[in-house]
Image (cartoon, helix red, strand yellow):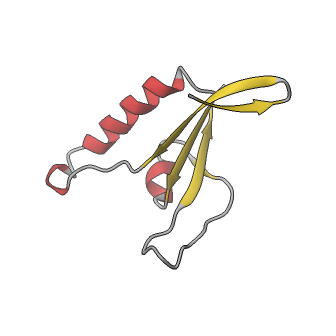
């Protein structure tokens, strides 16, 4: 379990990333179903959902917003961008 402290209160957080659907199964709504199920399960347990991805438009459909800065590593071919969805 992971937590963040705000004042004197600890809040559970969920960290998401590396979510993908095999190419053979894309275009049939499988990602949306998978991601919605994951969010529904974690939403009840967590005050904060943190997502690491470079897919701003995709995750924006689920209510995630850009949070922080985007960094590029010279050792990788893709960018990693932090997003967060805050639930209370």
Report whether 45 appears left or right of 28: right
Q: In this view, does 3 lie above or below 63?
A: above
Report whether 61 appears left or right of 71: left
Identity of the residue drawn at 42% across and 75% down: 77
Q: In which quarter of the image is the N terminus?
A: top right
Identity of the residue drawn at 58% across and 50% down: 83
Quarter of the image for residue 87 reads: top right
Quarter of the image for residue 78 reads: bottom left
Q: Is residue 48 above or below residue 88?
A: below
Identity of the residue drawn at 67% across and 63% down: 69
Report whether 48 appears left or right of 51: right
Identity of the residue drawn at 48% across and 61% down: 54
- Pinpoint residue 72: horizontal percent, then vertical percent: 56, 73
Q: Among all residues in the image, which is located at the extreme bottom?
A: 74
Depth check: 56 or 61 in front? 56
- Pinpoint residue 74: horizontal percent, then vertical percent: 52, 79
Q: Among all residues in the image, which is located at the extreme right?
A: 7
Depth check: 61 or 79 in front? 79
- Pinpoint residue 71: horizontal percent, then vertical percent: 60, 69
Q: In which quarter of the image is the C terminus?
A: top right
């Amino acid at each position: 379990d992971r937590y963040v402290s705000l004042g004197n209160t600890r809040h559970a957080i969920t960290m998401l990333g590396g979510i993908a659907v095999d190419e053979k199964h894309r275009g049939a709504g499988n990602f949306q179903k998978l991601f919605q199920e994951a969010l529904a399960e974690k939403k009840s347990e967590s005050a904060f959902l943190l997502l690491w991805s470079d897919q701003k438009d995709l995750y924006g459909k689920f209510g995630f917003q850009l949070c922080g800065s985007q960094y590029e590593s010279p050792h990788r071919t893709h960018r990693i961008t932090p997003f967060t969805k805050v639930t209370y």
